[in-house]
Amino acid sequence: MARFILSRLAAGIVLIVVISALAFSLLYANSENVARRILGQQATVEAVERRTAELGLDRPLVVQYGDWLAHAVTGDLGRSWFTGELVVTGVTSRLAVTLSLVLGATLVSGLIGVTLGLLAATRGGWIDRVVQVVAVLGFAIPGFLIALVLVLVFAIELRWFKATGYIPITSSFVGWLSSVTLPILALALPTIAVVAQQVRGSVLDALHRDYVRTLRSRGLNEVRVVWKHVLRNSGGPALAVLAVQFIGLLGGAVIVEQVFAIPGLGQLAVASTTKADIPMVMGLVIATATIVVIVNVLIDLAQAALNPRIRLA
Amino acid sequence: MKDSALFAGSLIRSESSADPLTHLGNAKKKANLGACLTGDPPEPVLPKRQRFWGIAHWEEPKVFHWKAAATALAMAAMTITGGAAQEGASTLVLGQFIAPATFDAPGAEWGNRSLYFQAVYDTLLNVTAEGTVEPFLASEYSYSEDNKTLTLKIRDDVTFIDGTKLTADIVKQNLERFKNGGGPFAVDLVNVESIEAPDATTVILKLSAPDPALVLYLSHEAGVVASPAMFGAADAATNPIGSGPYILDTAASVNGSSYVYKKNPNYWNPDVQHYDNLKINILADPTAIVNAIQAGEVNAIKLTGNTTNDVIEAAGWSMNFNELDFMGLLLFDRGGQQNPALADVRVRQAINYAMDREGLLQAMQQGNGTVTTQVFKPSSPAYDPALDQMYPYDPEKAKQLLAEAGFANGLTLSMPSTAVLGAASFTLIQQLLGDVGITVEYVDTPAENYIADQLAPKYPAVFMALQEDTDWQLIQFMLSRTASFNPFKYGDDTTDALIKEIQSGDPATQAAKAKELNKYIVEQAWFAPFFRVRIGYPSDPNTSVTVMPSNAVPSLYDIKPKT
């Protein structure tokens, strides 16, 4: 098991280094004029040249990347070229915000999606049909549109929640809840649809397996059959879907953060990319790549825990 | 030249008024989507559910708890938002689409970032909404006969929030730090040769050449005065120590999202302190802006475009329009270095005649603005309403001028285009010029290079939005041979002479010569302006806002509770 984890982690680290090299070369290919962009068009040519040299942009790409990597492995990702903010501080402070949205959305969609999927598969009939319709709607309606409706109903008309802005959990829990509930729902609804469909399919599949018939024939309580055996066997695919969705939610957060004016990674990514704030964008790339690797390793572990056959593979 | 200029940095999303990222109008949201929500979740049938969810004894209480919890949650939520709505009387909540890059005084910026600085700092002078420069931290100011020595008398009753008393020496150090600090507007003080503080209340600025805009700069970013405790402090970018009407609450603020200020209890000028608390929220997305307005989460807000005006007005808000930028073609290559055709004034005039300005205003800004053919703004002494009639839309006249200039068979013009300014704008310009025989060849440019490429200069002409500043600032920004937006450094004897007279003349001479200069460059068709863009700074029914024709946002002192 330790070997399994180590090999996954090693692959993850290689992946992060490769992604960073790719992102670095893509960004630096377009780094001309950065000093001018930082200083504004009123700055003199000499000032621009001086800043270019200060930033080390006059050196070859390989040297620049080597320098960046050497600092990065020590945890020093530099400072934003535009605001002077430490990249590590900038990214981590916003990471907390985005993760609270994405984790919240994953949790909500996991709970509701599994419940709906299970209900639809085990009870069939009109419940199944309703879940199916809701799932299709969830697929079909884009997240930002859901966000707009949620804001209109719950923030503008009913005024239950905040329409824009973010309140840190450390300053007020209730305030935090009022600022993240709608974004989490907006992110979660499409994912609920996906998870519900996946769970419904795999539970239906499992219910028709021989072992279920055997369990029933031995007089096992139906509740026990479903909860203990069927759910465990159909949990793998649901987890895989949730993992993919989790990573997708990081992307979805970009739009939701814009609509709700929430200071997360997405907003920082949009702001930094349009300015070509390369150190900040690199920090974001590293952060998201790391999250993706960690999530994948965790999911692998969870799969292995659920299904011993995977551990042997 | 703040934002439009810096329209550079965050192109378009800033001043530009072009509003490429707008999504749905709110009415549309309502109409399309109400239905999606009405599908009630399925209500499970009790006896059946027992099959799987078991155990009848927690079944019913569960339903009960659920409803109770929902009610409690709803009540809690109402309490939260009720509290937010009543931030009212003594709290001002503003929306702004751009966060401060730094709070450090040498990096100070006016334009769209002025409110952040005005809240925590005072400036040496102050400019009113009418454009008058008046005393502030400097209780008096006067120029020498030759306009090359500016003497400021500094107030002796001002203390910074850290308890330090304001002195002339602190002002001198601030000015020196601004000039040499490498900030984006350090160039404001380029003509300041030396700064002296002969006694505790006198500061003398010696200039290498007269600078008619200097007192304006000292009313804006260059006049910001910080406590010496900030000089070289590690947290200077995030922890301002000024003498201003408000104090930044760094613990309650979230960098890049919201900036929370409390009233400065020891402020020397309580007349401009209208609220106990001030909060500035970053709201950039047009949808988020409309939502914040409709949910009552802001009292006044800077818009980035005109597409949501009807929804905002429908919410009972006042629009407070301001015309700050003009959009149009900058015909940079007047000397014909890259495109010899542009050296012929008839070609430049033909381009002006080819522009259907009314049509462009409708298409690009839904009519929100005023067509113009000059780059000076109506409130400036240089402005002449008659000049706006100089180039009516007349494609025949344009063709005739081109033929006279020897381009009867047309000519080709290379210009940059960028997706963020809206593809439609570029297509319209291409069509209008094509109609008179000028073929535009666009080079698609990433947004972040759009301005740098113009200033390189890589193109003989560009489509652009620029801020219309006061006369001398505007001359230094786009007309003089050293101006950034005169990248080919073009000029002639007439413009050189007029600019010199404006620089050293008395106010009456300055006004007369600026008018002459304006007429000359319109006749010479240095530009082909289309229109001035109207952008709102809407405020709710309880808040009064006086717009500032010389700045992207109002003065903080001019945002007040309605009595």
Image (cartoon, coloured by chain):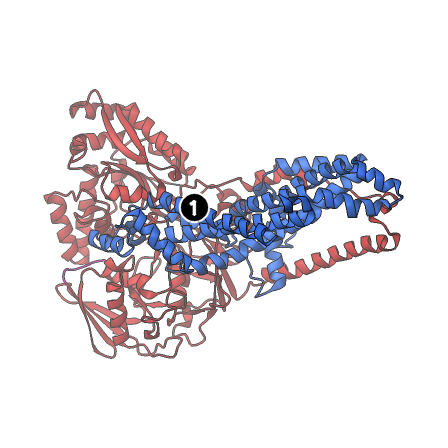
Chain colours: A blue, B red
In the image, what residue type sits under mark 1? Val
Q: Where is residue A186? Give x, y as percent.
A: 61, 46
Q: Where is residue B137? Give x, y as percent.
A: 31, 71
Residue range in magenta is B208-213
Q: Main secondary structure of the magenta part?
A: loop
Residue A249's place in the image compared with B426, above or below, is below
- Answer with the quarter of the image where residue B96 lies: bottom left
Residues B59 and B205: in front is: B59
Q: Where is residue B147? Give x, y as percent.
A: 15, 63
| Residue at the top extreme of this rendering | B409
Say which chain tag 1 marks.
A
Left or right: A121, with B93 as reference point: right
Residues B362 and B1: in front is: B1
Residue drawn at 32 percent across, 74 percent down: B228
- The residue that label 1 is drawn on is A18
Residues A308 and A179: in front is: A308
Residue B397's place in the image compared with B184, above or below, is above
Q: Is residue A41 visible?
A: yes
Residue drawn at 30 percent across, 31 percent down: B442
Residue B209: within the magenta? Answer: yes
- Answer with the quarter of the image where residue B559 lies: bottom left
Q: Where is residue A311? Give x, y as percent.
A: 64, 47
Left or right: A4, with B433 as reference point: right
Instruction: Please tell me how crowded label 1 is: few (under 14), some (14-19), or many (20+) other residues with Cα within 10 Å.
Output: few
Residue B51's place in the image compared with B262, above or below, is above
Look at the numbered disc 1 and give the secondary structure of its residue.
helix
- Answer with the quarter of the image where residue B150 lies: bottom left
